[in-house]
Image (cartoon, grey):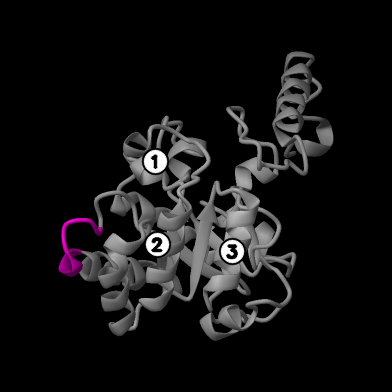
Amino acid sequence: MSTQKTVTVPEFVGRKGGEPIVMITAADFTMARLMDSTGEVDCLLVGDSLGTVVQGRPTTLAVTLDQMIYHTEMVVRGTQRALVVADMPFGSYHESIEQAIRNATRMMQATGCTAVKLEGGVRFADTVKALVECGIPVVGHVGLMPQTVHAMGGYKVQRNEQKILDDASAIAEAGAFGVVLECLPAELGKRVTEMIKVPTIGIGAGVHCDGQVLVGHDLLGLFDGHRPKFVRPYADLKEVVRDCVKRFSSDVKARTFPSLEESFR
């Protein structure tokens, strides 16, 4: 495997309307290395979803910038091919454009990630534009936005068509090189994808997006919690983990672990 990343921002943008983009979330070195080594993942997203699947919190709101930096740095170290995008957590870019530039700059300098992701549409278009003008690549995120889950009244499909179209258009025109679309009717996901000039990455937004993303823990069947309709687990690793622990426990109690071959002499 090459020691240099082969997926760049221009290459990502060039996939618009072409071969679908594969994006998965990761939060640590081992998972990033395993996923990246397949050569099939175009983008690893260090999502603030780690607040739920790693930290065990009910929402992503308590995730801090320091925590995102900590996890992103590990993912970058485990990655050779994929483009690494880091979520900017709640409160890290909301006060002002200056705050957003300062914190996004810190994120990139401290971790070596390629880009950052921000939730929000029209309201944050000027922020996206300012970041891009500073040389910080940005991925947008519209539709269901977990950082504003309380204002939205919970995790549910977003059906305000005009708002979604306006938000996605504003973020794309501000210079984002991709836009995540979360929890939209499939037809609306298609409309947004056809409307904007940069790739759309769907998560519960239908098959017509330019790519798809899943939380790594969901994809692997590791998260033992609520499973949204759009999640397709490709394994049930939580049961594999439980089985391994039970077998280890049995061997320890039977004094068959460690064996003579596993002991020093």
- Which quarter shows the C terminus? top right
Give the numbered dot on residue 60: 1
Q: Which residue is mark 2?
A: 167
Identify the secondary structure beneath mark 2: helix
Q: Position of residue 3 (x, y in %)?
A: 62, 80
Q: Viewed as shown, does residue 173 lie left or right of 26?
A: left
CB of mark 2 within 8 Å of CB of mark 1? no
- Given the image, on which type of amino acid does mark 1 rest? Thr
Which residues lie in the magenta part?
93-99
CB of mark 2 within 8 Å of CB of mark 3? no
Q: Position of residue 60 (x, y in %)?
A: 39, 41
- Given the image, on which type of amino acid does mark 2 rest? Asp
What residue appears at the point 55 percent right and 64 percent down from the top-left corner?
A: 192
Q: Viewed as shown, does residue 189 lie left or right of 137?
A: right
Please rate how many residues cluster around mark 2, counting C-alpha atoms within 10 Å: few if below 14, some from 14 to 19, many from 20.
Answer: many
258 part of magenta stretch: no
Give the mark nearest the N terminus, 2 or 3: 2
Give the numbered dot on residue 191: 3
Q: Position of residue 99 (x, y in %)?
A: 18, 64
